[in-house]
Amino acid sequence: MSTPVEEVGVILSQKEIANGIFDLTVQAPEIAKRSLPGQFVSVFCRDLSRLLPRPISIADVGAEGTIRFLYRVAGAGTYEFSTLIRGDALRMTGPLGNGFPEISGNAVLFGGGIGIFPLLYLVKKRHNPKDIVFLGYRNKELFAMEEFARCAEVRVATEDGSFGVRGTVLDAAGDLKEDFSAVFSCGPLPMLKAVFAWAGERGVQAYLSLEERMACGVGACLGCAVSGKKKRLRVCKEGPVFSAGELPW
Amino acid sequence: MVTDLSVDFCGLTFKNPITTASGTFGSGMEYKEFFDLSLLGAVTTKGVSIDPWEGNEVPRVAETPSGMLNAIGLQNPGVKVFQERDLPFLEGFDTRIIVNVCGHSIEEYCRAAQALSETAVDILEINISCPNVAEGGLSFGTDPAQVLRITRAVKDVSKKPVFMKLSPNVTSIAEIAKAAEAGGADGLSLINTLTGMKIDVRKRSFFLANRTGGLSGPAIHPVAVRMVYEAARAVSLPIIGMGGVRTAEDALELILAGASMVAVGTANFHDPLAAPRIVKGLAEFMEEEGIASVKSLIGAVE
């Protein structure tokens, strides 16, 4: 893993792609060239009353030194980001965390809600049409689905049943018959635990991206240290991606 | 003009008066990726106890206006791992090493201080002010008689200068400072965090798993300035001042109030390069103001 850097990026574009979900592209070549799927970036607010960085996953990296963030406005900090326009500066440190491992063979991916975003860069980089991606949405606001579909086979579950299977991504997966060598997942904790069990029953290694409240983002403060199987694990440093064997579930 | 940023106390010279606040900087390994730790006057480590501590459950941190709450609970791998892994790392830099020491009982503090006395650390900073652990920590730091007792006990077994790290959660910081001085402390560090609480109104539950946490960041800086000033007037010990320092100006306020050294804490989270930037800002300030030595500013408020 390469060492993280501080960089002041320049916003190239931003648009709202679904209710409260934004698609932001920023020129940040130093961070971009170091970034791997599953890693994240600490993004800082301009308002000095909000001191802590917002950890945002890397949704894609462009060849011209750009990074793409897909994020939901969840509070005052992410609201501030959503008001930025082309030409604005954005201070960041990154890339941070470990990222998803490179695994050959076909994979099954499970993404739920905003947890689908770190999977986008992974699916694009893998670009394996035999990978199967299960995307879970609340309703038929199917953000980023088409982009996934360009690189892999996509199956959708919606909570309200307005598109695809009604229910969760696990309901959509059912008893999957295809052969695959790894499971990658990011999403809400109950979903991750269900994926953990699902992969365990099939004897397939699962790589799960966790979310936790962070402060420093670099591994120093231990603010995000969750209980692991053997020891506490810093989600920002040893994670955010953990293999199932590291987790005490 | 050549400005002199160095400061001296306890027979030690520090190349500049900036260190890191315990718990915000680990042992520096994570920040080494952003800057050369030799730029600092000292590195102050996260609290170390004689045996490993697990710490509290998550969530452990919450942002608050111009600050944050933390309730890590002093998770640390214990003196042995610290000595084998962290100390050799820190000895590779041209900077002083201040190790923060924690314990559940006077006996545990003493065992850790004794073990660390045999190492290359320059100063022991005794944490009697952590608000996030059930035993030890704050319970030792709020009663002058207890402060005197623990200071004397740790001093008896330590071969390194002993700084007592004091809590702001007290009625009279001067009284606590005097108790530490009477116990034989070589210096004081203040302030630790102010105990606070945040409630999630939608869930109607506590934001932190520990319910309460320690408030840090610029929000507490004026409290730190006031308390460093009061402690400096009450005792004749060197003081490491801390609390919400984000800029060189913030550091200068604490120095003028009476601190010989200033620790940068929560600002490291806001900017991993905060500490070396403050060192640079201090040098620039002195040059602009035509001040030859930072020593002339210590306690110089009128």
Image (cartoon, coloured by chain):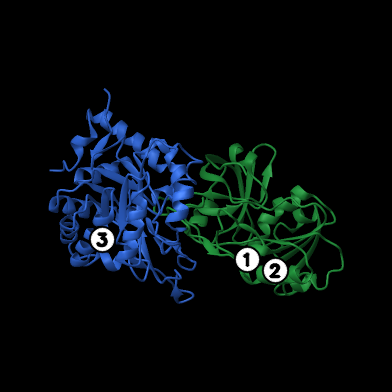
Q: Residue at x 53, y 48 (%)?
A: A84
Specify whether B215 is left or right of B286: right
* Image quadrant where residue B256 sits: top left
Q: Which chain is blue?
A: B
Rendered image quadrant of residue A245: bottom right
User: Where does residue B3 sit, x and y in percent of width and height?
Assistant: 27, 28
Percent position of residue B302, x then y: 12, 43
Query: What chain does mark 1 sit on?
Result: A
Q: Quadrant of residue B145?
A: bottom left
Question: Disc 2 is attached to a residue of which chain?
Answer: A
Q: Nearer the viewer, mark 1 or mark 2?
A: 1
Mark 1 — residue? A247
Q: Chain of mark 3?
A: B
Give the percent coordinates (x, y) of residue A181.
80, 59
**Real-space Cα separation, disc 1 to disc 3, in angstroms:** 38 Å
Does mark 2 fall on the same chain as mark 3? no
Residue A9: in sight, yes or no?
yes
Q: CA distance from mark 3 to mark 2?
A: 45 Å
Mark 1: which amino acid? Leu
Q: How many marks?
A: 3
Secondary structure type for disc 3: loop
